[in-house]
Image (cartoon, grey):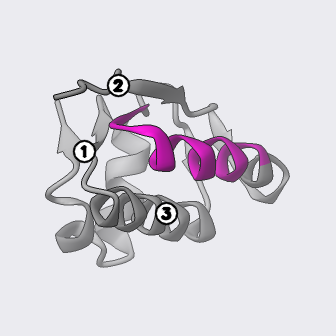
């Protein structure tokens, strides 16, 4: 059995439409290659589109039978998730 190395993406402080393309491009490749960890401790502001993109990336990873985890989500990110009613979608991937 081949063990896949976990890849990591660190989210920037502000995840808006300007930063979304770069994050999406990174995640598209990584969810095809193996387990992915997204580090979210630096997030100060996150757009709704970014949260939906993370849900989509997690779904793609699951379809490929890879783990997708968001580690150390900041208070701002957690608050945005709760405010938008997305806690259930994020519950299985949040760590720390």
At 66% from the left and 53% from the top, the residue drawn is: 24
Question: Image point 36% across, 56% down: which residue?
Answer: 61
Q: CA distance from mark 2 to mark 3?
A: 21 Å
Q: Give residue 94's position: percent from left, percent from top.
A: 21, 45
Q: Nearest the camera: 33 or 60?
A: 33
Q: Quadrant of the C terminus?
A: top left
Q: Residue at x 52, y 36 (%)?
A: 43
> Which portion, as a residue range, is magenta?
22-38
Measured in 3D between alpha carbons, the distance from the residue under mark 1 to the one under mark 3, in whole angstroms, is: 17 Å
User: What SS does tag 1 mark?
Assistant: loop
SS label for mark 3: helix
Q: Reply yes or no: does residue 27 show up in magenta.
A: yes
Asked if disc 1 and disc 2 are in contact, CB closer than 8 Å, the reply is yes
Circle number at residue 51: 3
Vertical arrangement, residue 3 with respect to residue 48, above or below:
above
Q: Magenta stretch containing residue 26, yes or no?
A: yes
**Residue found farthest to the bottom:** 85
> Which residue carries the number 2 mark?
6
Local crowd size for mark 3, using a 10 Å CA cut-off: few (<14), some (14–19), many (≥20): some
Q: Residue at x 79, y 59 (%)?
A: 17
Pick whichever of labels 1 and 3 is earlier in the sequence: 3
User: What secondary structure is marked by label 2?
Assistant: loop
Q: Which residue is mark 1?
A: 67
Q: Nearer the viewer, residue 92 or 29?
A: 29
């Amino acid at each position: 059995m081949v063990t896949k190395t976990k890849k990591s993406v660190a989210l920037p402080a502000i995840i808006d439409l300007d930063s979304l393309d770069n994050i999406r491009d990174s995640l598209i490749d990584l969810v095809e290659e193996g387990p992915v960890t997204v580090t979210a401790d630096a997030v100060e502001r996150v757009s709704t589109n970014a949260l939906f993109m993370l849900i989509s990336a997690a779904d793609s990873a699951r379809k490929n039978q890879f783990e997708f985890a968001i580690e150390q989500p900041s208070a701002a990110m957690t608050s945005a998730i709760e405010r938008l009613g997305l806690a259930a979608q994020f519950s299985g991937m949040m760590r720390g």
